[in-house]
Amino acid sequence: MSSEYQTTETLDVKGQSCPMPIVKTKQSIDDLEAGDVLEVVATDSGSMSDIQGWADGTDGVELLEQVEEDDLYTHYVKKTE
């Protein structure tokens, strides 16, 4: 996992499939302040494209990085506004 980002919160959505990783990511991002970074840890391979698409289409968030390692998918999402 990356230590490059100072994460504010970690969201564990392991074992959950679409759409729950996106739903819970949005809920968690809504509770953060601008500049905060959310680390999302998932086991659903679809979360790679789902979170990318959600971040691309959502104002106020930026997908910083996605890491795939041993059936774990970690996403770093920054709240920008």
Image (spheres, rainbow, N blue to C red):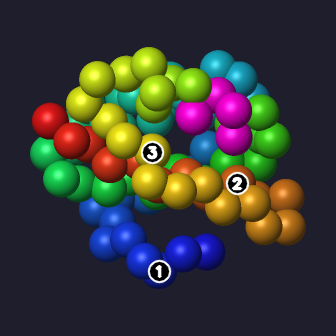
Q: Nearer the viewer, mark 1 or mark 3?
A: 3
Q: Nearer the viewer, residue 62 or 27?
A: 62
The residue under label 3 is which amino acid type?
A: Leu
Residue lying at the far right in this picture: please name it. 70
- 50 displayed left or right of 77: right
Pinpoint residue 62: horizontal percent, then vertical percent. 37, 41
Screen quadrant of the N terminus: bottom right
Residue receiving disc 2: 73
The residue under label 2 is which amino acid type?
A: Tyr
Vertical placement of residue 13 versus 8, above or below: above
Pinpoint residue 41: horizontal percent, then vertical percent. 60, 54
The residue under label 1 is which amino acid type?
A: Ser
Q: Nearer the viewer, mark 2 or mark 3?
A: 3
Instruction: Please say whether residue 43 is visible from this viewpoint.
Output: yes
Vertical placement of residue 12 versus 69, above or below: above
Read off the magenta span: 48-52
Pinpoint residue 5: horizontal percent, then vertical percent. 38, 71
Q: Nearer the viewer, residue 72 or 65?
A: 65
- 36 displayed left or right of 67: left
Pinpoint residue 49: horizontal percent, then vertical percent. 69, 32
- 77 displayed left or right of 14: left
- Dot 1 falls on a residue whose secondary structure is loop
Q: Which mark is residue 63?
A: 3
First along the sequence among labels 2 and 1: 1
Screen quadrant of the C terminus: top left
Q: Residue at x 54, y 75 (%)?
A: 2
Q: Is residue 50 magenta?
A: yes
Residue receiving disc 1: 3
Density class for disc 1 (Cα within 10 Å; few <14, some 14-19, many ≥20) is few
- Dot 2 falls on a residue whose secondary structure is strand
First along the sequence among labels 1 and 3: 1
